[in-house]
Amino acid sequence: LVDGKTPSPDWELDCYSRPVVGAGAKKLWEVLVTDSTGSFRFCKTLPSNQVNSKELRKTVEELMDDPSLPVKPTTIRFFR
């Protein structure tokens, strides 16, 4: 959480490649989740072989199950 603000229930998600190379000389990808006010940010690095809808769903579900988040999303906007 940023500055102790209460997150918005409107979340935004992006999955993008980084100019970073991991094991096996493969690009690393990041999943970024934030709310519409920017009061929280979550980032997870994924190897290229895990960039798929199943892994994105798992990441979002794990985040939604996090008891430290005071607000669960009512809307998630996906970019890309």
Image (cartoon, rainbow, N blue to C red):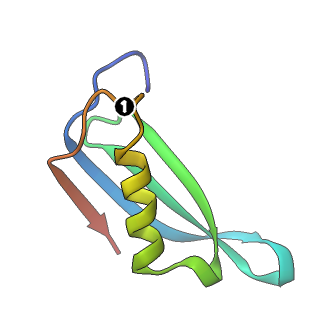
In the rendered view, does 71 fall on the left or right side of 46?
Answer: left
Which residue is pictured at 40% across the width and 51% down the height?
33
Query: Residue 36: which quarter of the image?
Result: top left
- The image quadrant where one finds the C terminus is bottom left
Q: Which residue is mark 1?
A: 69
Which residue is pictured at 43% across the width and 64% down the height?
58
Residue 49 position, x and y percent, is: 63, 84
Query: Residue 22: which quarter of the image?
Result: bottom right
Q: Count the marks.
A: 1
Q: Amino acid at mark 1?
A: Leu
Going by the picture, which residue comes out furthest to the top? Answer: 4
Looking at the rendered structure, the secondary structure element under dot 1 is loop
Which residue is pictured at 69% across the width and 70% down the height?
19
Residue 56 position, x and y percent, is: 43, 68
Which of the pair 11/71 is nearer the observer? 71
Would you call the spot at circle 1 few (<14 residues within 10 Å), some (14-19), or many (20 or more)?
few
Which residue is pictured at 83% across the width and 82% down the height?
25
In the rendered view, does 19 fall on the left or right side of 34?
Answer: right
When the figure is inspected, residue 3 is found, relative to residue 56, above or below; the finding is above
Residue 11 position, x and y percent, is: 26, 48
